[in-house]
Image (cartoon, rainbow, N blue to C red):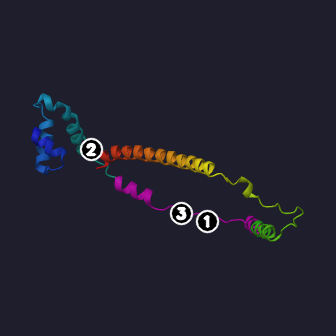
Amino acid sequence: MKALLEKYFDGETSLEEEAQLRAYFNSEAVDDELKMYQPLFQHFTQEHEQALPDDFDERLFQQLEPAEAKVVKMRTWPRQLLRIAAVGAVLLVAMVAIWKPNPTQPLQASIDWSKYEITDEQKAYEETVKALRLVSSKLNKGKHKASEEMEKMEKVGKYLN
């Protein structure tokens, strides 16, 4: 019976073998090791014995038949108001897009970046090293985060295979 039960849980039993299992677990002579499966097969037997009422089909078809369709008339004035509101919104957007105020303030002068340039080679080298260290630390953080996420995905992947 253990081998037949294993075969059943693997989904490889025939109908005759399943009937054998049901008969065995519905009897009183069930091995103590297999008693934990007895309620499962007893439940299958009980569910198989239950039948639908005779008028089940008739009641089902009554529920599935469409009820009489109700005609709903929509009032015309809300539609007219919606149309007017839509036209007003379009006109408002067009007016805002076309109308441009005259600038009263003069345009600001562009920034003179030459005063921020580093002329000393040693300082330029130090600033470049700082910038590269910053980029390197950010890339290392990203690499570690990506490897952690990949480990999580591998753990999840074990369950999906």
Q: Is residue 128 above or below residue 79?
A: above
Circles 1, 3 touching at the beta carbon (< 8 Å): no
Is 145 in front, or is 117?
Answer: 117
**Spatial CA span between label 2 and label 3:** 35 Å
Q: Residue at x 87, y 65 (%)?
A: 103
Quarter of the view holding residue 69: bottom right
Which residue is denoted by mark 3 in the rendering? 68
Whole-percent x and y of residue 158?
A: 30, 45
Query: Who's the residue at 18% across and 47% down the image?
Result: 10
Query: Crowdedness of circle 2 by 10 Å Cα count: few (<14), some, many (20+)?
Result: few
Q: Which residue is mark 1?
A: 71
> Which badge, 2 or 3, is on the more N-terminal residue?
2
Reply yes or no: does residue 72 show up in magenta. Answer: yes
Which of the 4 image quadrants contains residue 9?
top left
Left or right: 32, with 82 as reference point: left
Instruction: Using the image as rendered, state which of residue 62 and residue 64 is in the foreground.
Output: 64
Residue receiving disc 2: 50
The span shown in magenta is 56-83
Dot 1 crowding, Cα within 10 Å, few <14, some 14–19, many 20+ = few
Mark toward the start of the polypeptide (1 vs 2): 2
Q: Is residue 37 above or below residue 100?
A: above
Q: Which amino acid, by three-letter code, is at mark 1?
A: Val
Identity of the residue furthest to the right in this view: 104
Q: CA distance from mark 1 to mark 2?
A: 43 Å
Residue 128, position in %: x, y?
58, 51
Location of the N terminus (image quadrant) = top left
Residue 19 image-quadrant placement: top left
Q: Position of residue 35 (x, y in %)?
A: 17, 31
